[in-house]
Image (tube, rainbow, N blue to C red):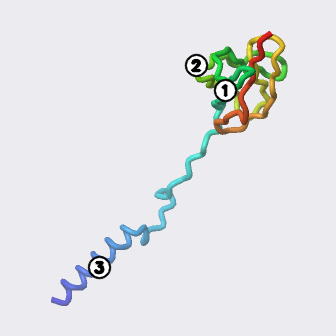
Amino acid sequence: MTPVRHTVAALASACLFTACGGGGSDASDAIAPTPVASPTFVRLEGCVVDQHDLPRAATVHASSEDGRVLDRASSNPQGVFVLKVPARQKVSIGLDASGEETPALLTGSTNLSLGACLRETLS
């Protein structure tokens, strides 16, 4: 009876060590951390209002420091637009209407939202 108990105890111990990760020193079993890739583009959300702060459908663009258009989108009837812009770069956001201000901002590596709506002024 004693040899059976010792065999069962040894088997139980081996199962316990295996289940909790103990008992082995094989480095190939270790889980390597997966590197997180930085995004190439981020999503920029904003809104457009008119001179009376009412939502406005308009065409909006993002441009690089050298003036290249990076993306263009139309705002919906609620004035909301979404642009896909390069991550970690300085971009200017503006309306396609001439003479409008184009605020510049530095994008990061996560999606972002403008802190205020772009204002469309009628000539």
Q: Position of residue 90 (x, y in %)?
A: 80, 30
Q: Is residue 94 left or right of residue 16?
A: right
Callout 1: few (<14), some (14-19), or many (20+) C-alpha neighbours within 10 Å? many
Point 78% across, 26% down: residue: 91
The CA distance from mark 2 to mark 3 is: 72 Å
The number of callouts visible is 3
Quadrant for the C terminus in the image: top right
Any part of residue 54 in sight: yes
The three-letter amino acid code for the residue at tag 1 is Cys
> Does dot 1 land on a helix, a strand or a loop?
strand
* In contact (CB < 8 Å): disc 2 and disc 1: no
Q: Which residue is mark 3?
A: 10
* Residue at 64 percent of width and 30 percent of height: 45
Location of residue 7 by image quarter: bottom left
In front of the other: label 2 or label 3? 2
Q: Residue 117 appears at what percent x and percent y?
A: 71, 28
What's the amino acid at mark 2? Pro
- Using the numbered discs, state the Cα–Cα distance from disc 3 to disc 1 in whole angstroms: 69 Å
Residue furthest to the left in view is 1
Residue 69 image position (x, y, % from top left) = 74, 16
From the viewer's perspective, is residue 7 above or below residue 79?
below
Establish if 31 lies above or below 66.
below
Residue at mark 2: 77
Mark 3 is on which residue type?
Ala
* Circle 3: element type: helix
| Location of residue 55 with respect to 97 vertically, above or below | below
Mark 3 and 1 residues: CB-CB less than 8 Å, in contact? no
Q: Residues within 10 Å of mark 3 (few under 14, many from 20)?
A: few
Q: Rounded to the nearest whole Å, what is the CA distance between mark 2 and mark 1?
A: 10 Å
Q: Write down the residue under mark 1.
A: 47
Disc 2 secondary structure class:
loop
- Give how far across and how far down residue 101 sits, in percent: 82, 21
